[in-house]
Image (cartoon, coloured by chain):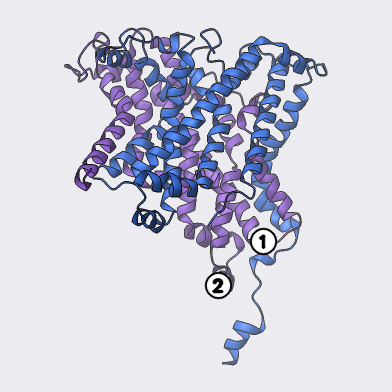
Chain colours: A blue, B purple
Amino acid sequence: MEVARTFGKARPVAKFSGVGRFLDVLPYLLPALLVFTVFEYYPLLRVIYLSFTDADLLRAPNWVGLENYQQIFTRREFHNSLVVTTIFAVSVTLLLVGLGMALAFLMNVKTRFQSFLRGAIFAPTVVSVTASALIWLHMMNPNGGPLNAILQALGFEGVRWLAHPQTALASVILIAVWMGVGLSAVIFLAGLQGIPRELEEAARVDGASPWQAATRITIPLLAPTTMVVFFLALMGTFRSYGLILVLNTDGGPVGSTNLLGWYIYQNAFQFFQMGYASALSVVLLLLLLFLAWVQFKATEGRVHYQ
Amino acid sequence: MSKFWRQRVLEALSLLVGLLFIAPLIWLLLGAFKAPDQLFFGPLIPNSWEWENFVEAWNSAPLGRFLLNTLLIAGFTTLLVVLTSSLAAFAFARMDFPYKPALFLLALATLMIPADVLLIPNFLTIRNFGWYNTYWALIIPFAASAFGIFLLRNAFMQTPKELDDSAKLDGATPLTFLFRILMPVNAPAISALSVLTFLASWNALVWPFIATNRDEYRTIQVGLAMFNNIEGATDIPVVLAATFISVAPMLLVYLLAQKWFIESAASSGLKG
């Protein structure tokens, strides 16, 4: 008895949470902090520094002040790139939200194809950017590719897809949506499953149509999820350009697919204008931070997590 | 509309939409078996199955090497991310130390810095380190993850504190407690982190594209993109065969563990 009491109570067992000194914790934090320091914090400072220089890959960089930034705002390509990027990001985001939500509703319906549907919609998510780009590139072949074959079978005219300035960006948007909508649908589905069924059923009992129950009850309750998907998609698309790299559009035809990320890549690694490309990177970073700030403001106080 | 017909319509819609989403993958698989002149103008199902496309794809580019590289890189990256995240998460969840909130915020702040913005300075860094065309360049910059730290810290914090006490009583050191008890108990969170890290690493394109230019170090994604530049104009079915080889491993794992994949991804969306 005596022994048990001593063991259990008299001397409180020191918890690991009692470790007080910084040196004791350092070994646990060091590996991650080291990687972050070398490949996140330091390069962040360095890219800001480089943006004020004329860095290329050969010579030591010279300080040029704001020249790169002045360049950015006078060059036509940048304006065009900003417009293209905005159209791309907004279209893809709205489609990922709208289509993702609609698909989540369908995925939530009990049918004998329910698990097939879920698996199929999410499948493109595990396919790489490279493979997705190549599959669609060849499906969009203007001379007899399957997409045009279908259009023609339906009585429409064939489209030039990626080869025409008026359809190229829309084609890239289509590919990006195919690749990305599975993830947003799955996030919406998780959100849907978090809403108590009784709420919708109560509305139905009170005589609401399924459409009314969805638009008045379920979709408003999904608002927190919608917000997450919206900003996740927006910030993801503002910096995506892997597709352009593989599709080999070179940002064209006539700049129609010149996404900001691609424009940076091209200036840095094809033209070796590291200073100018760094300034572009800083602009992109500020843009994304601004979006994050908007998200913070939009979510603050408005969204109620149950 | 009666309940019966409503159900039938939803059923048909589910089937149709599902097929629409996997149609490009089916086209890829069928196309990989076709002769070049049959791809666009022949029947959907090939009338002769050209297995040689796969042989030719395999022989005209070092796909085996690319796959092995990617497997090594994705495997080691995942291992390191799980290790560094677990260690840091353990400290943040279970220990008291000065500047803890500030350090946690500092780690999370990396989520706000998109990798694409750091492409240029990181390229210069690996060049200075002499890491251009090495595995190091493809692994070390990705060896820690703020998302991983965040995910595991939350999981560890929800693990009952009593476990710590009993482990301490048994004379376990903090490290053995972490590796023998805390991590196994949180296997679901750790496997979610692993699957997301592995997938992202396997599918990464831009960084491996920049950080290597020799076949010995190329990943399958980079190799595939180059392969299309060479063969894409002349022999599309061979490109499709190579593409299929590149997606097959991931699709196979996905088919086997579909539900688990989907749940991991959903958790990333809600928490990231």
Task: Please tell me whether mark 2 sits on a helix, a strand or a loop.
Answer: helix
Q: Position of residue A63 (x, y in %)?
A: 83, 18
What residue occupies the far front of the structure in this picture?
A207
How crowded is the residue under tag 2: few (<14 C-alpha within 10 Å), some, or many (20+)?
A: few
**Residue at point 65%, 35% (across, down):** B113
**Residue at point 56%, 26% (across, down):** B207
Gap in Å between the C-alphas at discs 1 and 2?
A: 17 Å
Quickly name the residue at label 2.
B166
Drawn side of residue B50 relative to residue A230, left or right: left
Looking at the rendered structure, which numbered label has been put on residue B95? 1
Drawn side of residue A222 relative to residue A105, left or right: right
**Residue at point 47%, 58% (across, down):** B184
Name the chain letter of the residue that bears numbered label 1.
B
**Up/down of B24 relative to A56, above or below:** below
Q: Position of residue A13 (x, y in %)?
A: 64, 75
* Nearest to the observer: residue A36 or residue A133: A133
Between discs 1 and 2, the one toward the N terminus: 1
Task: Please tell me whether mark 1 sits on a helix, a strand or a loop.
Answer: loop
Kind of residue indicated by mark 1: Met
Q: Position of residue A223 (x, y in %)?
A: 52, 46
What residue occupies the far left of the structure in this picture?
B47
Drawn side of residue B234 relative to residue A194, left or right: left
Name the chain letter of the residue that bears numbered label 2.
B
